[in-house]
Amino acid sequence: MLKIHGVPRSRAFRCIWAAEEAGLPYEVVPLGFAAGFKLERPLTINPNNKIPALEDGSLVLFESLAINMHIARKAGAPLMPSGDDASRVDQWTLWAATEAEPHVMRWAYNAFLKPEAERVPAEAAAGKEALDARLAVLEAELASRPYLVGKDFTVADLNLASVLYGSWLNGYDYTRFPKVKAWLDACLTRPKALAARKQREG
C-alpha cells in the first residue's frame, strides 16, 4: 500500500488524486502545518523536511510531481502512456513545475494564502502577469487537442491541473483563456478528482 505523508490541504492533494486515478490502495499519514507554513513535526524520511513524501515498500520519494510520475508508471496507460507520449508527459510535468507553479504561487500567496495584512497586491499582480503569459501558451496548445498529450487524460494533465487547482478554486480570472478554463473544468471534475477534492475541501 502507498503511504502518502501529508494532508490533503497541501501538495499531497496531487498525490492523493494520482493514487485515485491509478486505482492503487493508499493511506494518508497525517502531517500538517503549524503557524507560518511550517510542519507541525519533522518528516525525517524527507531530507527537505517538507510534505508530501511517499513510501512504496522500500522506496521513499519526495517531490509531489515525481511521486505522481511514479504512481502513474505503476498504473500504466492511459494515465502514463508509452513511447513519445511518455516524453511529452515529462515535458508538461516539468513545464508545470518551472513555468506555471512559481507564478501561480506568487499570485496565490498574495491573493488568498497569506493573512490579509501580509498580502502585497503588487506581488499578486506580478504573479498574475507572469502566469497569464504562460496560460497564453497553454491556450494555444489546447486549441488542437482536448488534453495535453492528445485525446486522453494522462498524468501530465493531472500534474498541471493540480498546480493550477488553487487558482481555479480561488477566483483567478481565466476569462482570456477559455480553452484552459474548459480543460481545467474537465480535469478537476473527473470522478477521481472529485474524490480527492472531497478530502481536500471537506
Image (cartoon, rainbow, N blue to C red):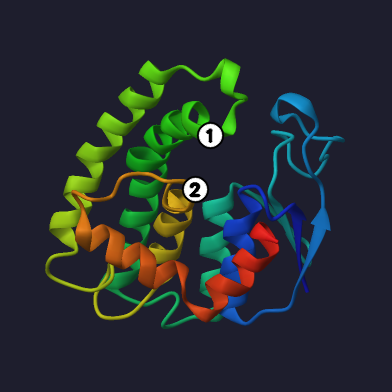
Q: Nearer the viewer, residue 122 or 93?
A: 122
- Report the residue at 83% width, 53% height from top: 30
- Report the residue at 37% width, 72% height from top: 186
Q: Earlier in the sequence, mark 2 or mark 1?
A: 1
Looking at the rendering, in which quadrant would you find the C terminus?
Answer: bottom right
Residue that mark 2 sits on: 166
Say which mark, if any, is on residue 112: 1
Q: Is residue 106 above or below residue 97?
A: above
Decide: few, some or many residues near mark 2? Use Cα within 10 Å; few <14, some 14-19, many ≥20. some
- Report the residue at 83% width, 39% height from top: 44
Residue 8 at what x, y percent from top left?
69, 55
Q: Is residue 35 left or right of residue 195?
A: right
Q: How many marks?
A: 2
Under circle 1, the secondary element is helix
Q: Is residue 181 above or below residue 195?
A: above
Report if the CB atoms under discs 2 and 1 are less than 8 Å apart: yes
Mark 2: amino acid:
Gly
Q: Is residue 61 left or right of residue 64?
A: right
Q: Nearer the viewer, residue 83 or 88?
A: 88
- Report the residue at 37% width, 76% height from top: 153
Say which mark, if any, is on residue 157: none
Residue 64 at what x, y percent from top left?
58, 51
Mark 1: amino acid:
Phe
Under circle 2, the secondary element is helix
Q: Is residue 116 above or below residue 1?
A: above
Q: Is residue 151 left or right of residue 25?
A: left
